[in-house]
Image (spheres, rainbow, N blue to C red):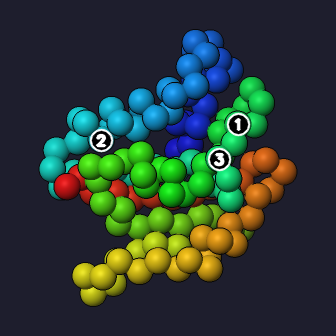
């Protein structure tokens, strides 16, 4: 859980590479077979940002847009002991709870833990 947001920041001895997180997601997408599933967790918030020498926080749409050969199956975030469901499929229809996406809190640059499930098209 939660590793992509650290890629390319140099915190763990890796070289500074601003787009390393995007390259990692694209490589996950590339190696999956059609109908393969990808589960990913990253900090999410209302804006994309780098928390100096620590990690990144992503708008959920940034992750969805980056994985452009995949279909989002489900997305939510952890709030206390609950998962707040923001995107899901019901009866073959994609349901987006925009008010929940719009209300993801930013907690002192940490965001919330976002949980994503994708399937490769």
- Give neighbour class at mark 3: few <14, some 14-19, many 20+ (Cα, 10 Å): some
In space, the residues marked 1 and 3 are separated at their CA atoms by: 7 Å
Does residue 112 appear in this view? no
Q: Position of residue 52 (x, y in %)?
A: 77, 30
The answer to whether residue 107 is left or right of residue 39 is right
Q: Is residue 38 above or below residue 15?
A: below
Please give the residue where the numbered disc 1 appears in the rendered image: 50
Q: Is residue 81 above or below residue 6?
A: below
**What secondary structure is found at the residue carrying circle 1?**
strand
Please give the count of numbered marks on the rendered protein.
3
Residue located farthest toward the right when viewing the structure as drawn: 108
**What secondary structure is found at the residue carrying circle 2?**
helix
- Give neighbour class at mark 1: few <14, some 14-19, many 20+ (Cα, 10 Å): some
Q: Position of residue 45 (x, y in %)?
A: 67, 57
Q: Residue at x 35, y 66 (%)?
A: 73
In space, the residues marked 3 and 2 are separated at their CA atoms by: 21 Å
Please give the residue where the numbered disc 2 appears in the rendered image: 29
In space, the residues marked 1 and 2 are separated at their CA atoms by: 23 Å
Please give the residue where the numbered disc 3 appears in the rendered image: 48
Image quadrant containing the C terminus: bottom left
Q: Is residue 76 above or below residue 59?
A: below
Q: Quadrant of residue 94?
A: bottom left
Does residue 20 appear in this view? yes
**What secondary structure is found at the residue carrying circle 3?**
loop
């Amino acid at each position: 859980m939660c590793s992509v947001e650290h890629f390319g920041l140099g915190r763990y001895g890796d070289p500074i590479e601003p787009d390393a997180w995007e390259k990692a997601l694209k490589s996950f997408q590339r190696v999956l077979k059609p109908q393969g599933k990808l589960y990913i967790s990253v900090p999410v918030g209302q804006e994309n940002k780098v928390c100096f020498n620590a990690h990144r926080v992503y708008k959920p749409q940034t992750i969805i847009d980056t994985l452009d050969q995949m279909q989002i199956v489900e997305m939510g975030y952890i709030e206390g002991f609950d998962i707040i469901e923001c995107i899901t499929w019901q009866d073959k229809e994609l349901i987006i709870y925009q008010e929940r996406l719009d209300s993801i809190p930013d907690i002192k640059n940490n965001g919330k833990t976002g949980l994503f499930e994708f399937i490769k098209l």
